Amino acid sequence: MHRLHWPRISGKVAYVPAHATTKPAGASRPNRLRRARYHHGNLKEALIDATVQLIEQGGVESVSVREAARRAGVSSGAPFRHFPTKTALLTAVAEQATRLLLEEMSRTLARCASENPIERFRALGDAYMRWVTNHPTQFEVVSNRRIIDFAGSESLQPDNDKIRSLMDGVLSEARDEGLLRSGDLATIALAARATAYGVARMYVDGHFAQWGVKNRDARHVFESVFDLFIRGIASAP
């Protein structure tokens, strides 16, 4: 089974933050952050952008609605009609992050030319890690259920369900074609998510150095780990 190349992903989204390529925890960060640029009509996006910048500078503890407003260049009271609390603001970051992840994975699956569902499943895993390495701060927020209101969000659960459906779809094809050792798709999907999440968490938390891995090699490491996982679930090489 050949290794997939990393495709260049392009596409139009409603909003792309100014910090589109951030660095993982433990990496050096710029001393001075750019002010979020606010234009009439995109206050929510500007506040989300400002919030991510605040996290990059001082961690989640440094975030407040008023400070996000200051970073965005608006009055301290302006954000509260959109985000009355810090939790609401962080939840908005998580919602945007999940939407962008869904778009990344959907585009990748649509562009994967292979008819082999195992190859398409690998492509989904690659898209996940590619997104994490490009958006480590957003991943840090969306993966911490203690700081966001996951249950109260109108989009987080539906978007997560759509991501799960992408995985379930290709795994169902693989099972129907006799390409899996087990027909227990729920366990396979859970194990795949745990594997991908574990590597991603090690990356953003700065654990790679302990294993002699450089951050720039994160995607290669993920490919190797995920290939090992796939060989374990596949019925044949």
Image: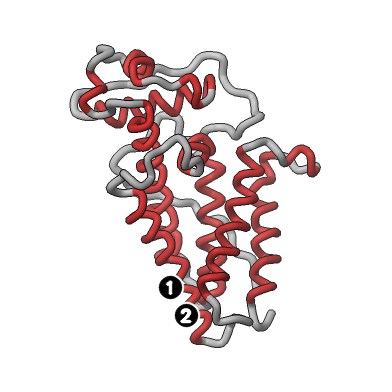
Residue at left 63%, top 51%?
198
Which quadrant, please, contains the N terminus?
Answer: bottom right
Identified at 56% across, 65% down, the residue is: 122
Q: Which residue is at 67% across, 65% downward? A: 227
Q: How many marks?
A: 2
Tell whether 45 sits left or right of 29: left
Query: How far across and down, in percent of the image, does residue 27 sit?
Result: 65, 29
What amino acid does circle 1 point to? Gly
**Amino acid residing under circle 2:** Glu
Percent of width and height locating residue 66: 34, 16
Q: Quadrant of residue 47?
A: top left
Against 9, residue 210 (above or below) is above
Q: Residues within 10 Å of mark 2 (few under 14, many from 20)?
A: some
For mark 2, what is the residue?
Answer: 173
Distance from the alpha carbon under mark 1 to that under mark 2:
6 Å
Residue 76 location, quadrant: top left
Q: Answer whether labels 1 and 2 touch (C-beta < 8 Å).
A: yes
From the top left corner, tell me how far across and down residue 187 is, in percent. Answer: 56, 70
In the image, taking residue 114 as reference, residue 13 lies left or right, namely left
SS class of the residue under badge 1? helix
Residue at position x 43%, y 50% in the image: 101
Q: Is residue 101 above or below residue 56?
A: below
Q: Residues within 10 Å of mark 1 (few under 14, many from 20)?
A: few
Residue 176: x percent and y percent? Answer: 49, 86
Label 1, on which residue?
169
